[in-house]
Image (spheres, rainbow, N blue to C red):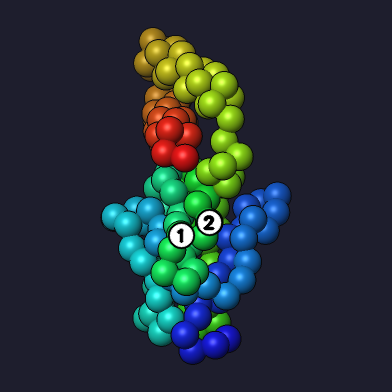
Amino acid sequence: MAEDKVSFELVTPEQVLASGEVDMVVVPGGDGDFGVLPGHAPLLSTLRPGIVNVYENDKVSQRLFVAGGFAEVAEGGFTVLADEAVAVEDIEAAAVAERLSAAQEALTKAREAEEGVAAAEAELLVAEALSQAAGAH
């Protein structure tokens, strides 16, 4: 790995969505956004739903929505293990609206049944963040 680059990989259970040598990556950590530059100290963090910004040549070269997961900075580079991820430009507004509506309905039903509320709230959080990401591109 070049000393002025970060070896970055974003992986979902289905695919490798991004991989390469980049200048910097900013991710939505569980406790707040953080950036990874060359030489970053080892780190393990949870991710919250949000956008991963990949920088090359002093500008954002890729924007990827992640639904959650983990991020690990190690000597070999930076890896994001995402539960679900999609390039922001590939987000379809109609699909997001449908997912948001279904998540709101599922939460209402879960509260009425008094079970599954945490899972329904988590899905609503992802759907809302995806909706924000769709509006940001």
Q: Is residue 132 visible?
A: yes
Q: Judge the density around disc 1: few (<14), some (14-19), many (≥20) Cα neighbours within 10 Å.
A: some
- Closer-to-camera residue (119/40): 40
Q: In the rendered structure, which amino acid carries the disc numbered 2? A: Gln
- Closer-to-camera residue (8/11): 8
Q: Position of residue 31 (x, y in %)?
A: 29, 55
Structural distance between the alpha carbons of marks 1 and 2: 6 Å
Decide: is 101 above or below 38. above
- Dots 1, 2 in contact, CB < 8 A: yes
The numbered disc on residue 133 is none
Q: Position of residue 91 (x, y in %)?
A: 57, 36
Lateral position of residue 132 relative to residue 18, left or right: left
Q: Judge the density around disc 2: few (<14), some (14-19), many (≥20) Cα neighbours within 10 Å.
A: some
Q: Position of residue 17 (x, y in %)?
A: 64, 55
Seen as rendered, the residue at the extreme bottom is 3
- Closer-to-camera residue (41/2): 2
Count of all numbered marks drawn on residues in the image: 2
Q: Is residue 106 visible?
A: no
Task: Provide the secondary structure element on which disc 1 rests.
Answer: strand
Lateral position of residue 121 relative to residue 56, left or right: left
Give me the residue at 70% from left, 50% from top. Answer: 14
Q: In the rendered structure, which amino acid carries the disc numbered 1? A: Val
Lateral position of residue 46 relative to residue 87, left or right: left
The numbered disc on residue 62 is 2
Residue carrying label 1: 60
- Closer-to-camera residue (36/59): 59
Decide: is 33 above or below 41. above
Give me the residue at 49% from left, 69% from top. Answer: 56
